Amino acid sequence: MSVLDAIRVVLVRPIYGGNVGAVCRAMKNMGLKHLVIAGGGPTQDLDQIRPMATHAGDIYDRRRETASLSEAVADCGRVVGTTARRGLYREHAKSPRELASELLQAASDRPVALVFGPEDDGLSNEDLLHCTHLLRIPTSPEFPSLNLAQAVLICAYELFVASGVYEPPVERSPEAPMEVKERFFQMWRTMLLEIGFMDEPKADHMMLGFIRAFSRGPLTLADLRMLMGVVRQTRWVVAQWRKYRALAIEAGLVKETDRRAPPLIPDIDTT
C-alpha cells in the first residue's frame, strides 16, 4: 500500500461545487484518495461538481462529511493547515516542498491531513487551533491568492514526487559506444564535404565543433541510426544532383562554372 493512502485532504466549508470537483481531479492526478468535507458542503454551482471532477467522480462519491474540522482530523497525527495570510503565529509556515518528506514519514504511522479553508477567506484562527503545522505555498507577492484546486494540486504534487511513487521513463536505447559515434562522425564529415558545406583544409577544425554539439547530451544507438539515415539519404540526393548536373552541362542548360542546381525546365525566351 502506498504511503499516499494515509494522506487526507480536508476541505473546510467549501463554497463552490466546481472547486470541489476540481479538487477531486487534482487528488486523483497525484494519487490521493481520501477527501473529507468539514463544516458543511458547497452551496453554489453544485451542478459543476462532476463535470469538474472529470474522471475523478469516485473520489467525490467516497468523500466523508463531518460536522466540524475537529471531527475530520481526530485520528490524524499531523494536521497541516494552509494559509496565505501573514501574522505573528503564521510566520513559521513552511512550503509544501519543505514539509513533504516529513509528512510522508509521519504518514507511515498515522494519517496526515492537509486542511484547506473556504475560498473567500481561508482558514480562520479558530480552524488553525486544530492544526499542528502551517503551510504556505510560495507565490508572487503581487497576487498571492490561489484557487482552491490549484492549492491542493501543488501540495499533492510535492507529496507525490517525494513519495517516490513516480518512476521517470528510462531511455530504452543505450548510449552508443565510441566506435559507433566515430563511424557516424566520419559519415557526417564526408557528407559535409560532398554538399560543399566545408573544404578539406578546414574539415578537421570544423568537425571539432560538430562533435562538441553532438556530445552535449547522450547519443543513443537509436539517435545514431536516425542520423546515419539522414546522412545516407543526403549523400544519395547529392549523387543524383551531380548526375543531373552533368547531363545539364552536356545539354548546355547550365555552365560548368555555375554552382546552382540545373533548372528542371529550360528557360524559354518569350520576347
Image (cartoon, helix red, strand yellow):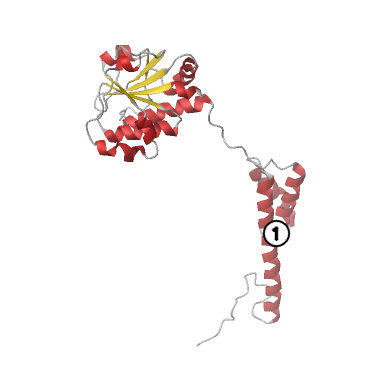
Q: Is 253 above or below relative to 25?
A: below
Q: Residue at x 69, y 46 (%)?
A: 221
In the image: residue 149, left or right of residue 204: left
User: Which residue is identified by label 1?
Assistant: 232
Query: Viewer-proximal residue, 65 or 7?
Result: 65
Q: Is 152 above or below relative to 113?
A: below
In the image: residue 168, left or right of residue 234: left
Query: Viewer-proximal residue, 228 or 83?
Result: 83
In the image: residue 127, left or right of residue 266: left
Query: Viewer-proximal residue, 124 or 230?
Result: 124
Q: Quadrant of residue 90?
A: top left
Q: Count residues near mark 1 (Cα–Cα under 10 Å), then give few for <14, some for 14-19, many for 20+.
A: some
Looking at the rendered structure, the secondary structure element under dot 1 is helix
Give residue 220's position: percent from left, percent from top.
67, 43
Give residue 119's position: percent from left, percent from top.
27, 28
Most extreme residue toward the left is 43
